[in-house]
Amino acid sequence: MRLIKLLILAVSGLSLTLTAANARIVVDVNRGHADPLPIAITDLVGNENDIVSGGSVKSYGQRIALVVKADLTRSGLFRVVDSGAFIKSGNALTTLRNPNFNNWKAIGAQALMNGSISLQEDGRLKVEFRLWDVLGTNQMTGLRYFTSPKNWRRIAHLISDAIYKRLTGESGYFDTRVVYISESGPATARVKRLAIMDQDGHNHVFLTNGKNLVLTPRFSPTAQEITYLSYFNDNPRVYLYNIDSGKQEILGDFPGMTFAPRFSPDGNKVVMSQAYKGNSDIYVMELTTRKIQRLTKHTAIDTSPSYSPDSRYVTFNSDRGGSQQIYVMDSNGKNIKRISFGKGRYSTPVWSPRGDLIAFTRQYRGKFYIGVMKPDGSGERLLSESYLDEGPTWSPNGRVIMYFRQQPYDKQGRGGDTQLWTVDLTGYNERQMITPLDASDPAWSPLIR
Amino acid sequence: MLEKINGAKYWALIGAALLLSACANTGAVQDAPVEPVVETQEPVVAEPTEDVTTEPMMDPDTQESLDAASSAALVYFGYDRYDLSSDARSGLQAQAVWLQEHSSVKVTVEGHCDERGTREYNLALGDRRANSVKNYLVALGVDPSRIHTVSYGKERPAVTGTGESTWSQNRRGYTRVN
Amino acid sequence: MRDAVIISLIFHVVVMATGMIGLPIFIRDKPTEMRVIPVEMVKIGEVTKLRAQEKKPDPVKKKTQKKTPERKVEMPPEPPKLASSMPLPDMKAKPKPKKKSINKKPAKITAKRAPRITPKTKPRRFNTGKLSALLDKREETEPNAFEKLKDKNYGKEKVISTIDIQQQTLSIIDAVNKHIYDNNCWNIPAGAKGAEGLLVTVHIRLSPDGELIGVPKIADGGRMNLPGQEYYRTAAESVLRAVRKCAPYDFLPKDQYNLWRDMEINFNPEYMLNG
């Protein structure tokens, strides 16, 4: 009996050899690359002989393609295939709906954007584009826009947003603006002005003349208003600025300095700090009723408040524990909890619009870092490091962080340059923004509607 | 009333000091008998009487006067600190004396920080520093309504540069005559 | 002599019998075994590490237990490479979550795969387990020198044959993995929210030349078009691009076509993301 069992065992071993051949192979891939996706962007096909103000329709098609290329490249998630490598095949118009995928595959493109632009009878431009999956040989999306020629940049950004959204699964952030502080002059007598620009640095406009020191502008959720700090009459107070009307007004009648303002996600409130008799606490003001509620009451410095996107919490920094650290409280000021416990000082917490992270500035051993952590304080990651990095602001899709960086001075006293930078949430793709003058305190607008 | 009397005594003292120094000066001139430019000083010497003539010379309710009286109207702070060192206190004592003598003067105490902190925190820290200064002056008898405070955070450094020697000069409280 | 003949007879009969009864068991059982192995994500060249498998036949239970810790040991060296290439001075925290995720992973996979496998497999798989367990016990309880000897011999035979297939399978798995990695086929949708849940399984069928036949099938394809699943769609599309970009798979040994004609590839960005 024993013997037989043994034999069975032996035989079954043999049988394995014969039969396993029919097994299906399972491959587990968990290594990949985080390379940008190669995408080909063709000029929008347009008529050279149709002239509108600013050039031919064809030239608008080229300019739009250029802006789309720049947007996608800057995101770091795409690599725009050099148009010099394009393989010409057939009539440009007929291939719009029927691209030669093999040609695009041959030059390494995995996605393709093509489209057309034409002049309508009403003087507006009709802009169409299609996004193709080169390897899967199918159309992924296609959209059509009508606009007056002067809005061509916005159309380009909208196309970029559509491509970005279709290929990454998250909404884009190209049709957005940035408000920031433009700086000039020596540090000891710095001139600071409110300025606004498109996310790619174009359409730059100064909003104030530099007579009064202004700081820390922040967008309302409609992107129509800005709240900021002005030293008007040498009285630092929080102001409201309406972009359309240019109207400015002081917020509230506080005895002490008000600063560090930020809108609530619904735009109905502004949360800010008041420094009074040497103590800074956090207050929130309802904009319609101007009713003020005090959120913190502590001898420590409580400042830099920022709402969670669901309005349920406010994160802020405080030195109540001895050194500057990040705290989260209910939006009524209850249940204050410290969330940062690393070495050094933590400050300027800003809640991601996606809700999953809080960005912050950290100081440690003479360096400044921009980092992110989960709202419970776990999962801290540092994304940038320099002599002085400060003041993160989120792209509206929660994917990119903008901040400013100041260079140190050398022995000859040169330096101190201050510029805006962006970095991807992964820590890759750190880039400097180009601004006319030095720049600080950026605030990214929500998506413009 | 007390203040006035004090003021009078003060001026008398100053007048006497001036007389003395004038004498010393002429003495020095005699030692090196080259310049006969003594004439301008003579009228001053000639009027040693109480306050009338000395006041216009000494009076200035100016920043320069305060600066001269109190180590440039400045006090310095440690990194991320707002407590007053003994140096700072003695400087403020001199400021208090000057303020009591210049009783019509109102001042603004500016709180400043170095650039090694984030902007908003530094605004709050500057406010703490300005109020440290104010509170001490008030404790020395200066009427609080004469002292306004303002924080400039790290927005108005006194000197530019990188390193502790620069930063320590920027962490300051400055008493500005309005 | 007589005994020998009898033994031989019995032997033959048993061979036939098990051939009929036992075969199906192993046909179905095998894949689950193979599946467990590649999870280790060996670098190519580590095929020789089969040492671990050689011990396999004796303590079946122990082996499965051992393996999980082994994975833990082997995995961590990889992610830090990514980490070091990122300008994150503060990566110390990373290893912890990673270990967690590694622990999670096998569970996730078995859970996800189980439904895909024909229901029959499950019970059968347990059968073998029980069988070998029983055998083990016998050996322990009845330490007969003769049996032991025989057992060893048979055991060896069995081991070698198993290894042969496993080795072939492993090298195919490794080759595909390496091919996908070396040719930059898979671009991970980095930074996506909730990347942990973005494991994507794709089924591909290959021609003998290694070309894709038909459209690669995403196992959970329906999810791609659900609202709110844009991240999953993005991940799935990155996988589709990867398997297409990597075609043809003409490096695979033609004589083993039946092994790789149908493949299931699991793309898991978890180790690369978030951490």
Image: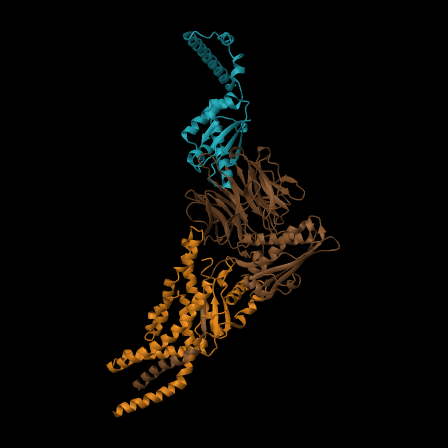
Chain colours: A brown, B cyan, C orange
Q: Residue A286's x, y, as percent?
A: 61, 45
Asked if residue C23 lies left or right of residue A128, the reply is left
Residue drawn 55% across and 55% down? A354
Instruction: Give the vertical position of B16 relative to B81 (above or below).
Output: above
User: Can you see residue A192?
Assistant: yes
Q: Front-most of A414 and C21?
A: A414
Q: Front-most of A54 and B109?
A: A54
Q: Front-most of B63 and B101?
A: B63
Q: Residue A192's x, y, as percent?
A: 57, 37
Residue furthest left in the image = C145
Residue A80 placement: quadrant: bottom right
Residue furthest right in the image = A121
Q: How many dots with numbers?
A: 0
Q: Front-most of A181 and C263?
A: C263
User: Can you see residue A333?
Assistant: no
Instruction: Give the vertical position of C182 relative to A210 (above or below).
Output: below
Instruction: Give the vertical position of A283 relative to C266 (above or below).
Output: above
- What quarter of the picture does the N terminus of chain A occupy? bottom left
Q: Residue A133's x, y, as percent?
A: 58, 64
Q: Residue A200's x, y, as percent?
A: 58, 48
Asked if residue B27 lies left or right of residue A223, the reply is left
